[in-house]
Image (spheres, helix red, strand yellow):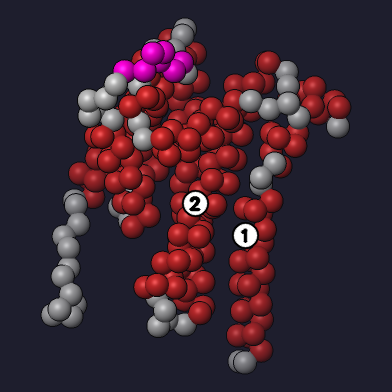
Amino acid sequence: MDEINRLITNPRYQEILAIVKGARNALVYGAKIRFPHALVMSLIFHGGRPLKDRARFVYNATKQHALNLCRFNAIYKTSLLFLRQIGGKEHKIDTFLAGLLGGYFVFGEQNSVNEQIVLYCVSRVISSFLPRAQPAKLPTASKPDIIVTQTTQPKIFSIYAAITWGAVMWLFRWRRHTLQGGLVNSMQYLYLDSEVWSNLKNLLWRRFNFTFQFFLALFSTKLIQANVSSSHR
């Protein structure tokens, strides 16, 4: 174990392991944020549906949110590393370009979960430009009665998502004081806290048990349901 800890704390591997921990933090955060939200939504809006359908809704929403954040984090941090390598140093535009790339390929697919996340971010991006007191020191680092809404054209939404994520990542890096506090705290955990660890436990395992238990429980439920279904055939 000591040898492993020495290996993962070696500065030579810091940049690569930061990508690993960033993706891991995003997976944990996405599951913790979406699971209670999806559970409440299933109880409020899907109360008339079978329990199996509600469980599937919670599982799918949580899985998509967690995996999308995980993928975005990995793409974002990998892109930053690549840009830093070819540019010799960090440039202000790097965070925007990395966010643009991740936003397009991860959140560019139009669905309910992605729409919620993109709209959440775009509201924070827009509100960040409202006038405010400058801090003393900037941070460094089809029923007739149902209205059917028209969705955005998929290509337009992809570009919209890309610009939103590019902007929010740039703002977090260079104008963090203008962003909403809750968003800053979330992004701090996802993209900055993942830069620091001292051993294998706080690199991967700390706070990971919730995510593991969640997916293990749902996997077990699926196995039980499959066995019950096969026994009735």
Q: Residue 111 versus residue 211: which sits nearer the camera?
A: 211
Residue positioned 31% across, 18% down in the render: 134
Q: CA distance from mark 1 to mark 2?
A: 13 Å
Residue on which the image places disc 1? 214
Mark sitting earlier along the chain (1/2): 2
Q: Residue reaching furthest right?
A: 2
Query: Does the stretch in magenta take in 220?
Result: no
> Which mark identifies residue 10?
none
Q: Quadrant of residue 218?
A: bottom right
Residue positioned 61% across, 79% down in the render: 225
Query: Does the stretch in magenta take in 139?
Result: yes
For label 1, the SS is helix
**Which x, y percent locates residue 152?**
19, 52
> Visible in this render: residue 60?
no
Q: Which residues are magenta?
A: 134-140
Q: Residue 105 versus residue 180: which sits nearer the camera?
A: 180
CB-based contact (under 8 Å), mark 1 and mark 2 = no
Q: Residue 222 versus residue 29: which sits nearer the camera?
A: 29
> Visible in this render: residue 206?
yes
**Which x, y percent locates residue 94?**
38, 19
Residue positioned 66% across, 89% down in the render: 231
Instruction: Identify the amino acid type marked 1.
Output: Phe
Say which of marks 1 and 2 sits in front: 2
Q: Main secondary structure of the magenta part?
A: loop
**Which x, y percent locates residue 39?**
48, 66
Residue positioned 59% across, 30% down in the render: 194
Q: Quadrant of the C terminus?
A: bottom right
Query: Does 7 appear above or below 146?
Result: above
Please tell me how crowded label 1 is: few (under 14), some (14-19), or many (20+) other residues with Cα within 10 Å.
Answer: some
Query: Does 129 appear above or below 160?
Result: above
Residue on which the image places disc 2? 33
Query: Does 193 appear above or below 12?
Result: below
